[in-house]
Image (cartoon, rainbow, N blue to C red):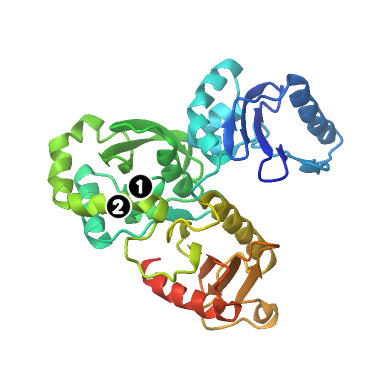
Amino acid sequence: MGEHGTGGTVHLLCLATSSGVPLFCRSSRGGVLTRQQLPFSVIGSLNGVHMFGQNLEVQLSSARTEDTTVVWKSFHDSVTLIVLVLLVGLEELTNIRNVERLKKELKASYCLIDSFLGDPALIGDLTQCVDCVIPPEGSLLQEALSGFSEATGTAFASLVVSGRVVAATEGWWRLGMPEAVLLPWLVGSLPQQAARDYPVYLPHGSPTVPHRLLTLTLLPGLELCLLCGPRPPLSQLDPQFLERWWQPLLDPLRACLTLGPRALPDGFPLHADILGLLLLNLELKRCLFTVHPLGNKEPSPEQRRRLLRNFYTLVTTMHFPPEPGPPDKEDAGHRTQLPRACYLVLGPGMGWQVVALQLGPRQLLLLLSSQSPTHGLRALATHTLHALTPFL
């Protein structure tokens, strides 16, 4: 339930479908988390309207007033949030025996849920692609990660900085959606700890049997993640074992720390007019998102994120197909009518420009300053896409 506008309030309710008992309520206002709770009478009314429709075999999905939108979504005829399966098993959610116990178990998901409700620096929740960064010495990190993964006996390993994947093994990249997006996001949402042994359920791969997510902090903000079964025990990953693999790469690891907000290594050649960018590889389901490429020009990072997120929603619903097409060949019929590029000038009084370009499986969205000439937008976007293509 949300009020329109950048300063609006969002309430996320979770109820047991059969009884209507509230499991939790999380709220944010203008992207800032709040303790505001909806009155029980409002919660009961919202649930009662939905149940009334179901009894009449009418599926009520959304409703809108002048300043408020309400959306209902059922999950397995039990609760409404699929994200909860990451930290609570499917069996516990679909077969609720003890509501109070379930409420306590759901508290483990609050950090993750709150990170969605705030003003997220990531964009995987919208694109369903994994947020990534470009490390300056990626091949060295990839080689070390593969060796470490083999030594520990797990095929699923990654390096994560601020919720973004720096490098990952082939097994990690084979994870299905949504866990491939949610696992790094979960790691980025949790308070800093030297090590964790965290039980997680995989919505696609293992919704009823938990896996272990092991995380080890190599440097503050940079974490090594392993998804595994009963072995290895966390105690096996002692400091000497970690030092043997990662101490020789201390400088490349340190260089990754600035990649959280920037996503691109220092010195990466970007045009001075670029205020933010979003690059997606729709085949690999990976994306690169940054609003910190250059300086502290207006608009603010928060505004840039909102502008690019809104523009992505517009171009994917109005212009670009949801699945990647062949890079050089067009299908007969309507595909030949699909646009390859579009742009908007934002206003009035702002003058910032957004441009989107699609070539094969890649989509690039740019937020540009007002002085960037309109006639050069496509050339600038094409040049930027070619520069980034080898990395994603």
Q: Nearer the viewer, residue 253 or 273?
A: 273
Residue 136 image position (x, y, % from top left): 28, 61
Residue 157 image position (x, y, % from top left): 31, 47
Q: Residue furthest right?
A: 56
Can you say which quadrant of the picture contains the N terminus?
top right
| Residue under the point 22% across and 49% down | 150
Q: Secondary structure at mark 2?
A: loop
Q: Is residue 9 left or right of residue 258?
A: right
For label 1, the crowd category at 10 Å Cα-Cα, with few meaning under 14, some 14 to 19 and many 20 or more, is: many
Residue 169 image position (x, y, % from top left): 31, 54
Q: Nearer the viewer, residue 141 or 381?
A: 381
The residue tagged 2 is: 256
Can you say which quadrant of the picture contains the C terminus?
bottom left
Q: Callout 2, which amino acid? A: Cys
User: Within the image, what quadrant is residue 34 found in?
Assistant: top right
The residue tagged 1 is: 161
| Residue under the point 68% across and 34% down | 77
Residue 370 image position (x, y, % from top left): 58, 68
Q: Is residue 338 left or right of residue 58?
A: left
Asked whether residue 195 is in view, the answer is yes
Give the CA separation, mark 2 to mark 1. Answer: 7 Å
Q: Is residue 260 left or right of residue 121?
A: left
Q: Earlier in the sequence, mark 2 or mark 1?
A: 1
Q: Callout 1, which amino acid? A: Val
Compared to 213, does 37 lie above or below? above
| Tag 2–tag 1 contact (CB < 8 Å) | yes
Asked whether residue 98 is in view, the answer is no
User: Within the image, what quadrant is residue 346 found in?
Assistant: bottom right
Q: Secondary structure at mark 1?
A: strand
